[in-house]
Amino acid sequence: MMILHHGWRSSASRRVRLCLEEKGLSYQGHHVDMAKLEHHSPEYLKINPNGVIPTLIHDGRPLHESGTICEYLDESFPDPPLRPEAPYERALMRNWIRHIDGLIHNLIIFNWRHHLQKTAQQWSDEELAEMLKKVPSKERQESWLRVARKPYTEEERAAARAKLVTLLLDRMEEALKPSGWLVGKAYSIADISAVPFVKRIDEEIAPDEMSAQKHPRVADWWTTIQARPAFARANFGPFLES
Ligand SMILES: N[C@@H](CCC(=O)N[C@@H](CS)C(=O)NCC(=O)O)C(=O)O
């Protein structure tokens, strides 16, 4: 029995939902409402000490970190395989996950202003101070402070957008050259790791960069990914409210 604590719009959660769907695994979803700070409740911190989503519970045991969860799922349920066989390619796959987690995730500073800013801006200074005490990492404390009191400026967003293009799309364009997949000759967790971020770039952050003129291989890859039945089942939905 598997339970996934997740958010519909959370990139890390989307990654795990996609992996579960690619493997055809059934699970019970439990929605965590970040606007209500459910991920900072004492009960949730027991299953995810970092106070972030997602968390997978499998056979009663909790696991955090979306990249680790995807690898764990592939090890536990090997069919269909989502990791390359060769150790070198497997290592490259891990480097993609690491690269995206370390450098790309933080650049998605565009996200919180859509759903969390309204709530966060209404907190009094006392409420904000109380809230910040509960956030386990300094970096996330800063994100909450920014969304509540000092939203990112257009200049900061432009700088993040430019980095997303060079650090994600340009690198993907190069990596996709040999086979059309990020690593080796097949779809893998490296591709799955990138999907939620490419989705955000395509729908809002820099859709013009996804054209066949600018990043032709990424554009083809993205068309192929979106046509996969698991992509529809993972239910990314629109990020922005219409
Ligand atoms: N490296 C973690 C990142 C998880 C993460 O940052 N999740 C975001 C949503 S995508 C979150 O819970 N943010 C809430 C917060 O920082 O307070 C993973 O891949 O699981």
Image (cartoon, rainbow, N blue to C red):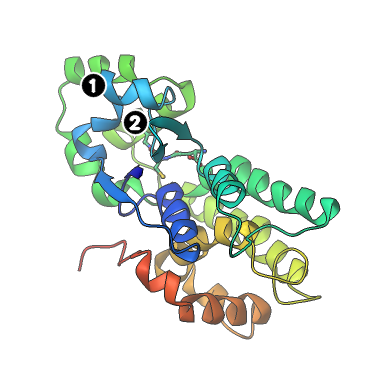
* Mark 2 lies on residue: 144
Quarter occupied by residue 134: top left
Neighbour class for label 2 at 10 Å: few (<14), some, many (≥20)?
A: many
Task: Determine the quadrant in which ligand 1 lies.
Answer: top left
Marks 1 and 2 in Cβ contact (< 8 Å):
yes
Point 47% across, 81% down: residue: 227
Q: Is residue 26 above or below residue 40?
A: below
23 displayed left or right of 129: right
Position of residue 112 relative to residue 142, above or below, is: below
Asked if ligand 1 lies within 8 A of label 2, the reply is yes
Which is more toward the observer, 113 or 159?
A: 113
* Left or right of 125 on screen, residue 74: right
User: Mark 1 sits on what residue?
Assistant: 128
Q: Secondary structure at mark 1?
A: helix
Q: Nearer the viewer, residue 240 or 154?
A: 240
Considering only vertical position in the picture, is 180 above or below 70?
Answer: below
Q: Amino acid at mark 1?
A: Leu
Amino acid type for the residue under numbered disc 2: Trp
**Residue 147 at x, y percent in the picture:** 32, 37
Q: Please state the horizontal and vertical placement of residue 19, each as a whole percent of the image.
A: 49, 58
Q: Residue at x 59, y 52 (%)?
A: 74
Q: Residue at x 35, y 44 (%)?
A: 1
Q: Position of residue 83 (x, y in %)?
A: 68, 57
Relative height, residue 190 to residue 103 (above, below) = below
Q: Residues within 10 Å of mark 1 (few under 14, many from 20)?
A: some
Mark positioned earlier in the residue sequence (1 or 2): 1
Q: Residue 209 bears which disc, if any?
A: none
Q: Quadrant of the C terminus?
A: bottom left
